[in-house]
């Protein structure tokens, strides 16, 4: 419960979404659909990068 309070529900949800994206990408890659696996696998770091950018912008406005 302490982890949820420290991260916040929205951030925890986004981290779980990134984990799900990575699992789906690994499944696609390992079942032979390599290009789609790589394509989907790039979503997780992109999503994390956007979240970091939003946090930086939010912190600079304070």
Image: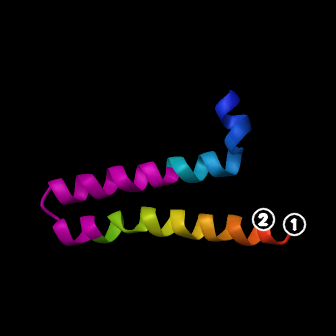
Picture residue at 53% right of the left edge, 68% below the top:
49
Task: Work out how far the residue at label 1 is from the one at label 2, CA to CA, in angstroms.
Answer: 5 Å
From the viewer's side, name the closer residue of 61 and 41. Answer: 61
- Percent across and percent down for residue 22 are 36, 54
The residue to which callout 2 is attached is 59
SS at circle 1: loop
Q: Which residues are magenta?
A: 17-38
Residue 21 counted in the magenta span? yes
- Percent across and percent down for residue 62 are 87, 66
Taking the image as shown, residue 58 lies to the left or right of residue 18, namely right
Circle 1 Cα neighbour tier, 10 Å, few/some/many (<14 / 14–19 / ≥20): few
Q: Is there CB contact under 8 Å for labels 1 and 2?
A: yes
Q: Of all residues shown, which one is farthest toward the right?
A: 62
The residue to which callout 1 is attached is 62
Taking the image as shown, residue 12 lies to the left or right of residue 29, namely right
Where is residue 21, by image quadrant? bottom left
Circle 2 Cα neighbour tier, 10 Å, few/some/many (<14 / 14–19 / ≥20): few
């Amino acid at each position: 419960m302490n982890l949820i309070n420290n991260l916040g529900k929205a951030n925890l949800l986004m981290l779980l979404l990134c984990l799900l994206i990575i699992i789906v990408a690994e499944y696609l890659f390992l079942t032979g659909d390599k290009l789609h696996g790589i394509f989907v696998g790039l979503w997780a770091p992109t999503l994390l990068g956007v979240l970091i950018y939003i946090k930086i912008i939010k912190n600079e406005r304070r």
